[in-house]
């Protein structure tokens, strides 16, 4: 980290607009603590960014699809830290790496983005909804079996441009990504380029989010003790507790981010609540459960939640 007598870090990230914004937020947090810190951003292309490999790999399973190439650069010492959307991280990190910090979770909800004013209940019968998430596809079929659900790929701007073509009635996106791009769905309408879309929050008890949704995670080489100490200064403690519990639930389930599983932990003071949802192959309705306990015992609660769901 020491280069020419100054502290400098090289940060690896994907090249999407959202990934760059998330990286800028991490750098702003670091520079607010250490004004003399010099930061360099390195854009790394992942398999998930390559249209030739993204679709086959996603269908086979997304484990490491958006993170593997970045983790390799981290282990080779070509970058000092990596910035990820936490929901993209496999439930088991690459050996020799760890999550050094997380920024405060800004939102965990899913949002319906539609070409006409509507919500989940008032979507036209036999309407067409596009989403690339297997979890969201199962949740939609559970509550609106009449809908036609089609696959959707690409980053957030690409998905919004596809919606504007009029092929579908609606798409589903993460609230956090929209907010970080300056498209706040709280207003019930967002404007993107020359188009206006209507927004409706999807009920969280039905659309239990992906583990880590809405969280920015900073991954480091476990040998980098100096950087670990620096990152403690920007780590949001409660968000870290929630992410740890959600990731433990996924690890115990042996789930990656392409499986139809939702899990959400929330902290209020010293109390943590966890909700989990699992869709089995061929089942319409999910198995689900909720637990509550001490916020410091997230891993124990994750195991208790899975045991409760499994009956």
Image (spheres, grey):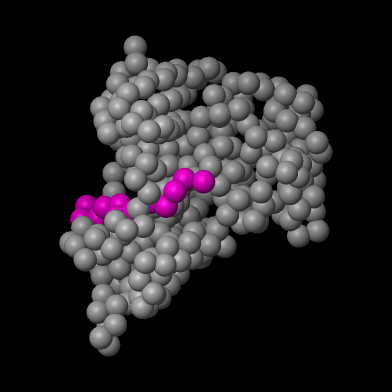
Instruction: Using the image as rendered, state which of residue 286 and residue 193 is in the foreground.
Output: 193
Q: Which residues are magenta?
A: 94-106
| Position of the C terminus by quadrant | top left
Is residue 306 something that shows in the picture? Answer: no
Is residue 132 rendered to the left or right of residue 123? left
Residue 175 position within the rendered picture, expressed as x and y whole percent measured from the top left: 59, 43
Question: What residue is at 32 percent from the left and 23 percent from the top?
Answer: 293
Classify the position of the N terminus by image quarter: bottom left
In the rendered image, residue 101 lying in the magenta stretch gets the answer yes
Q: Quadrant of residue 232?
A: bottom left
At horizontal 62% and vertical 50% (from top left) the residue drawn is: 178
Residue that appears at 76% across and 29% down: 123
Left/right placement of residue 293 relative to residue 32 reads left
Residue 287: x, y in percent? 45, 17
Residue 79's spot in the image, x, y percent?
32, 70
Q: How many marks?
A: 0
Relative to the observer, which residue lies in front, 28 or 17? 28
Residue at the far top: name it.
Answer: 311
**Residue 294 position in % (x across, y down):** 30, 27
Most extreme residue toward the bottom is 4
Residue 269 can be seen, yes or no: yes
| Residue furthest to the front | 269
Q: Image height check: is 168 above or below 299?
A: below
Occupied quadrant, residue 288 = top left
Is 46 left or right of 302, judged from the image as shown? right
The residue lying at 47 percent from left, 45 percent from top is 105
Residue 62 appears left or right of 202: left
Q: Is residue 219 magenta?
A: no
């Amino acid at each position: 980290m020491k280069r020419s007598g100054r502290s400098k870090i090289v940060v690896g990230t994907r090249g999407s607009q959202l990934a760059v914004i998330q990286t800028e937020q991490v750098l702003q947090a670091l520079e607010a603590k250490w004004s003399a810190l010099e930061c360099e951003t390195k854009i790394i292309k992942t398999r998930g960014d390559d249209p030739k490999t993204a679709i086959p790999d996603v269908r086979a399973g997304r484990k490491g699809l958006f993170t593997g190439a970045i983790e390799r650069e981290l282990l080779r010492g070509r970058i000092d830290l990596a910035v990820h959307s936490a929901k993209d991280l496999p439930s088991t990190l690459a050996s020799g790496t760890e999550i050094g910090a997380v920024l405060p979770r800004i939102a965990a909800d899913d949002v319906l983005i539609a070409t006409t004013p509507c919500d989940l209940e008032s979507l036209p019968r036999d309407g067409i909804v596009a989403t690339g998430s297997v979890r969201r596809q199962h949740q939609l079929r559970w509550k609106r079996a009449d809908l036609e659900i089609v696959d959707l790929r690409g980053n957030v701007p690409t998905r919004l441009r596809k919606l504007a073509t009029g092929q579908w009635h609606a798409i589903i996106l993460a609230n956090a990504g929209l907010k970080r791009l300056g498209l706040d769905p709280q207003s019930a309408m967002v404007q993107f380029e020359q188009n206006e879309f209507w927004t409706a929050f999807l009920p969280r008890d039905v659309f239990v989010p992906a583990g880590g949704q809405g969280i920015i995670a900073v991954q480091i080489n476990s040998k980098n003790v100096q950087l670990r100490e620096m990152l403690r200064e920007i780590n949001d403690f409660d968000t870290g507790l929630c992410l740890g519990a959600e990731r433990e639930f996924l690890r115990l389930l042996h789930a990656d981010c392409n499986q139809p599983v939702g899990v959400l932990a929330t902290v209020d003071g010293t109390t943590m609540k966890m909700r989990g949802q699992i869709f089995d192959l061929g089942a319409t309705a999910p198995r689900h459960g909720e637990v509550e306990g001490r916020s410091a015992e997230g891993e124990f609660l994750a195991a208790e939640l899975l045991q409760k769901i499994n009956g």
